[in-house]
Amino acid sequence: MEKLLPEPDTAAAQSSAFHPLTWISRARLIALFWVGTVLGLSVMAYTGHVGWDSHDYQVTIQDLRQGIDPYAKGIAATVAFQKQYVPGTAEHLPVAYHYPPITLPLLRSLERFPGWALGLFYGGAIAIGALLQLWAGLQMADKYERRWLALALPAIPFFPGLITDDVILSGNVAFILYGVILAAAVQGWKRNNWIWYYVAIVVASACKLPFLSLLAFPVLMDRRQWIPSIVTACAGVLIFAAQARLWPNLFREYVVAIRMMLDWKREFGYGPAGILGKALLASGHPSSHATAVFHMIFAGVLGIFLLFLSFRVRKYHIPPETWVPVALIGTLLLGPRLMRYDLAAISVPMLLIAGRTLRHVLQRPADEKTADSFSAKFFRLPILVAAVCFLIPNVLTITGPFWFPGETLVLLAVFSMGIWSIIRVQSEEKEAELA
């Protein structure tokens, strides 16, 4: 029987002609949003604190120019602070340089450039890195999601990890490193070309060793990446260990500076182990051993679970757009220390997972089975919890930062939504095979 085509809805077509936004093209609207983002960040930078991390890099360059050991200077300032510190005061702990000695030759090579030129170049690199992160997140969206995500991207810099914060203004080098890594990851999972991803990880781990945990991502995407990932991890560890032989005094000072940062600044991050470490210190208990053991157990269990999920993804041919955000968030959870600039890198994947789950639960097909309906109703509770965890920190950050433990709860809630999406798609594939 010939299928009749529906007649066009002339009334809807006529009404759309008078829509208030019809005179504004989509491209112009997106450009307008980006102009608002640039203006907003400029006002925040002018009226508030900016570049607190990049300032440390600038000070280190100046110290190297004058022949000063940046590690020894920071350690001495921290020891002096400890002696005169009065609990309850608002004094800020001095910051010691806490990057490996291998980064010092790079900073020393920048001594010859004027400060304004370095600031301009570095600010541009931060902006490019942040844009690369957003571009990589856009590649994880389907055609429907790209329509609204393109409009939402200008707001993402203000919501790292979906919690409002101004970390984009910190100038931390992680924005550059994550931008390059995620751009290379797109080439990996779309074109099966992982070489640049491994190069980016080796370079990034020379600055921050925990970047090596991101080597789990290629393995989750392609089981043939086990050997390249292991080789890259060995290369990163060897580069780190070689510094103890090349610069023994500087390396010892670097380790002391890291320990002081954890003990005094309590920058354990926003992962589950970080929350435990901060809670133990707040209660007056030592945190280093308990936090390390807890993270090893957590990362081990999570790693096995992610490998199991990757096996199911390959078996049931789950689309990459569904799996990639979940695998990326799970990979970052394997890291020992998640900071705000780390969470900025997965803001778009988190938004995609939350949006997909909300859309699936609230827009139920009329002919859906009872079991699926029950599953959706059962899952509304985690969605409600995630919404509360999202709203409370964002409301409270108006008067001050409130990231503990709100961000951790949001992160875990979104990750659980991603797991549920994998299970749901798997169930749909099973039903399609049986039909």
Image (cartoon, helix red, strand yellow):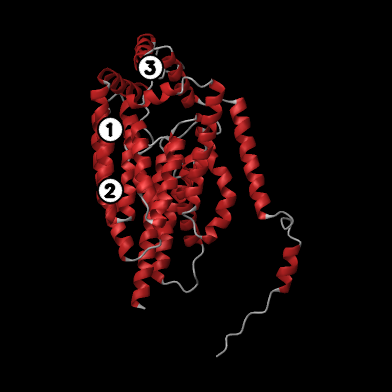
Image quadrant occupied by the C terminus: bottom left
Q: Quadrant of residue 285?
A: top left
Circle 1 Cα neighbour tier, 10 Å, few/some/many (<14 / 14–19 / ≥20): some
Disc 1 designates what residue?
239
User: Is 346 above or below relative to 261?
Assistant: below
Q: Nearer the viewer, residue 316 or 119?
A: 119
Q: Position of residue 412 (x, y in %)?
A: 38, 46
Whichever of callouts 1 and 2 sits on the residue coming sooner in the sequence is 2
Marks 3 and 2: which is nearer the front?
Answer: 2
Q: Residue at x 57, y 43 (%)?
A: 155
Residue 50 visible in image? no
- Residue indicated by mark 2: 228
Specify the amino acid type for callout 3. Answer: Pro
What kind of element bears circle 2? Answer: helix
Find residue 76 and report its horizontal and vertical position in percent: 35, 11
Q: Earlier in the sequence, mark 3 or mark 2?
A: 3
- What kind of residue is marked 1? Ile
Which labelled disc corresponds to residue 70?
Answer: 3
Using the image, tell me which numbered label, if any, was put on residue 195. none
Q: Residue at x 49, y 22 (%)?
A: 55
The residue shown at (36%, 43%) is 332
Q: Quadrant of residue 14?
A: bottom right
Mark 1 near mark 2, Cβ–Cβ under 8 Å? no
What's the residue type where badge 2 is placed?
Pro
| Alpha carbon separation for disc pair 3 and 1 | 21 Å
